[in-house]
């Protein structure tokens, strides 16, 4: 295997940045949590509006690219052919982008909206129920996947079109920064990427671990606690470390394919043996409600009413997508040779959104049905025992009992492994000096970052639990947000420059032939 060399400055610099941030949370949890809370409040209160405008602008940019004159630009040149089949390609993008968080929020997010709805609606009312089934589709739909997709387009263009054989963010900003992208500023950008990755992945682990622990406790009777959580994270670390070690073809691709087919099987089972008509009717209504109110939801702040719904949910989600976006962009760019700009946008924004919608429709509407029909008091269990307990109660009320619960836990485990092995692979790629299209980062480096992600997550859960991780996501998204803006301007500059070059070359050929 052709192995890329390690960039020592990015490698050690990123570890120092991550260590400086994580140390206060593990060594002095109370003060560290208070610091994160203060930073989070400042960001959501002062910059919440900017996150909404950013998401809307990115969606508009991608729509223009997909429908405009650059839509048919093929990464790697006109003769380039895809490295992976379309199904495997979409599966790797989708499973890397959402992890087990989709199963967590897909099943329980509606309950938060139902008891604390937007727009000043009465909690647990009919309209609150309709919006509860709808807002999850919005938060995991077009805008979210557009945030993911934009850096993927830019990095794929830089890597496959411009020939920058370094799979990192700094080179994707070269259109704006010029040669400064090769100096200390570029190194800082790459370090902030790894910084943001730790925040995003930490939140994903923080959501997935208690969910798996709850299921294991229900099945085996093992008491919940830090020991069980740490054991689950250790198992995850071993699994996604092994997959990242094997590389794209032998590890990540096969795991993503397995994940896709297993997810389809579990979804079909619940759809057929659960409240089928309610799921389909509510999903249909939710699509219409979201389509009709997409602009309102995209710009809803409620500064007059003073509600915190947008800051607590939409701003958090957009910050989460921003923190994760460079990772998804780097990973997707690596596997997208031979695809056009339009194909990439359609695969991510539309196929990605549809996959999330199906999960929310099946898992979420099943829980909503049980709540409305008094089969399971989901909101009461949520308030008394937490989200993981409410999720297990929903699953236990479905046909299949323990077998369905086991299948759900295996699916959640594989979902998160596919996300985290892609994360470790991508972080190792960024910490490498240069990578050709056939090179891969050093295996020891992939394993190292797998251990870093697992270790940081255990330390943060011991220090403060889920809330500090969520706050960390919002905080780490701020520098990443600036980087994404630089990347967007770089892409526009490159497209215009390359179009001018192509036009001049065509004219030159015409003059010679004449």
Image (spheres, rainbow, N blue to C red):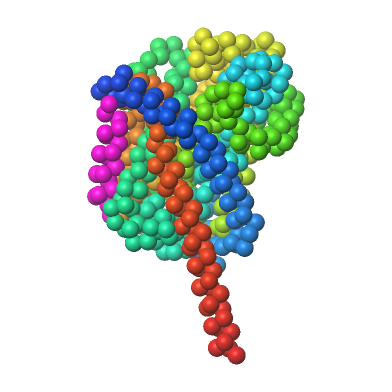
Q: Is residue 330 something one can see in this rendering?
A: yes
Q: Which residues are magenta?
A: 2-24
Which quarter of the figure has residue 111? top right
Where does the image place residue 27, in percent across and percent down from the top left?
A: 25, 23
Where, quadrant-wise, is the N terminus in this rendering? bottom left
Is residue 160 inside the magenta stretch? no
Is residue 4 inside the magenta stretch? yes
Q: Residue furthest front?
A: 304
The image shows residue 162, relative to residue 466, as above or below, that is below
How many numbered tags mark residues here?
A: 0
Where does the image place residue 51, in percent across and percent down from the top left?
A: 51, 38
Which quarter of the figure has residue 286? top right
In-front residue for pair 30/280: 30
Query: In the image, is 490 to the left or to the right of 73?
Result: left
In-front residue for pair 133/48: 48
Q: Residue at x 32, y 45 (%)?
A: 191
Q: Is residue 356 something one can see in this rendering?
A: no
Q: Residue at x 43, y 27 (%)?
A: 41
Where does the image place residue 18, in percent across and percent down from the top left?
A: 30, 36
Kindly report the secondary structure that dominates the magenta region of the rendered protein: helix
């Amino acid at each position: 295997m052709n192995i890329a060399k390690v960039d020592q400055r990015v490698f050690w610099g990123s570890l120092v940045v991550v260590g400086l941030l994580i140390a206060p949370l593990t060594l002095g949890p109370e003060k560290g949590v208070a610091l994160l809370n203060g930073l989070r409040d400042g960001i959501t209160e002062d910059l919440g509006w900017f996150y909404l405008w950013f998401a809307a602008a990115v969606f508009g940019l991608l729509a223009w690219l997909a429908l405009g004159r650059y839509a048919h630009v093929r990464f790697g040149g006109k003769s380039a052919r895809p490295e992976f089949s379309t199904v495997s390609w979409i599966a790797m993008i989708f499973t890397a982008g959402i992890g087990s968080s989709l199963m967590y929020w897909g099943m329980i997010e509606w309950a938060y909206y139902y008891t604390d709805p937007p727009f000043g609606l009465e909690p647990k009312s009919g309209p609150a129920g309709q919006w509860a089934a709808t807002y999850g589709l919005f938060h995991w739909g077009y805008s979210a996947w557009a945030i993911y997709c934009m850096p993927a387009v830019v990095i794929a263009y830089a890597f496959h079109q411009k020939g920058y054989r370094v799979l990192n963010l700094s080179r994707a900003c070269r259109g704006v920064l010029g040669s400064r992208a090769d100096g200390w500023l570029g190194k800082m950008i790459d370090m902030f990427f790894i910084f943001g990755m730790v925040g995003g992945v930490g939140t994903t682990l923080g959501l997935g671990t208690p969910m798996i622990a709850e299921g294991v406790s229900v099945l085996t009777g093992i008491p919940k606690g830090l020991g069980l959580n740490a054991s689950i994270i250790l198992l995850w670390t071993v699994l996604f470390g092994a997959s990242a070690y094997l590389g794209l073809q032998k590890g990540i691709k096969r795991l993503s394919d397995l994940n896709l087919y297993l997810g389809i099987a579990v979804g079909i089972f619940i759809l057929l043996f659960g409240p089928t008509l309610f799921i389909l009717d509510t999903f249909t209504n939710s699509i219409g409600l979201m389509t009709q109110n997409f602009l309102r939801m995209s710009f809803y702040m409620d500064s007059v009413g003073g509600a915190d719904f947008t800051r607590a949910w939409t701003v958090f989600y957009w910050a989460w997508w921003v923190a994760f976006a460079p990772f998804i962009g780097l990973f997707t760019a690596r596997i997208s040779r031979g695809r056009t700009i339009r194909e990439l946008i359609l695969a991510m924004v539309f196929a990605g959104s549809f996959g999330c919608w199906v999960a929310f429709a099946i898992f979420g509407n099943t829980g909503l049905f049980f709540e409305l029909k008094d089969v399971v008091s989901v909101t009461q269990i949520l308030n008394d025992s937490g989200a993981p307990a409410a999720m297990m109660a929903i699953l236990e009320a479905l046909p299949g009992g323990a077998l369905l619960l086991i299948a759900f836990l295996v699916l959640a485990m594989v979902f998160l492994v596919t996300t985290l092995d892609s994360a470790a692979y991508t972080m190792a790629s960024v910490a490498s000096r240069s990578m050709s299209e056939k090179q891969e980062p050093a295996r020891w480096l992939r394993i190292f970052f797998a251990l870093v992600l697992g270790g940081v997550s255990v330390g943060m859960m011991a220090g403060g639990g889920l809330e500090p991780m969520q706050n960390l996501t919002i905080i780490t998204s701020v520098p990443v947000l600036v980087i994404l803006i630089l990347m967007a301007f770089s892409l526009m500059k490159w497209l215009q420059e390359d179009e001018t070059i192509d036009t001049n070359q065509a004219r030159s050929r015409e003059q010679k032939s004449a």
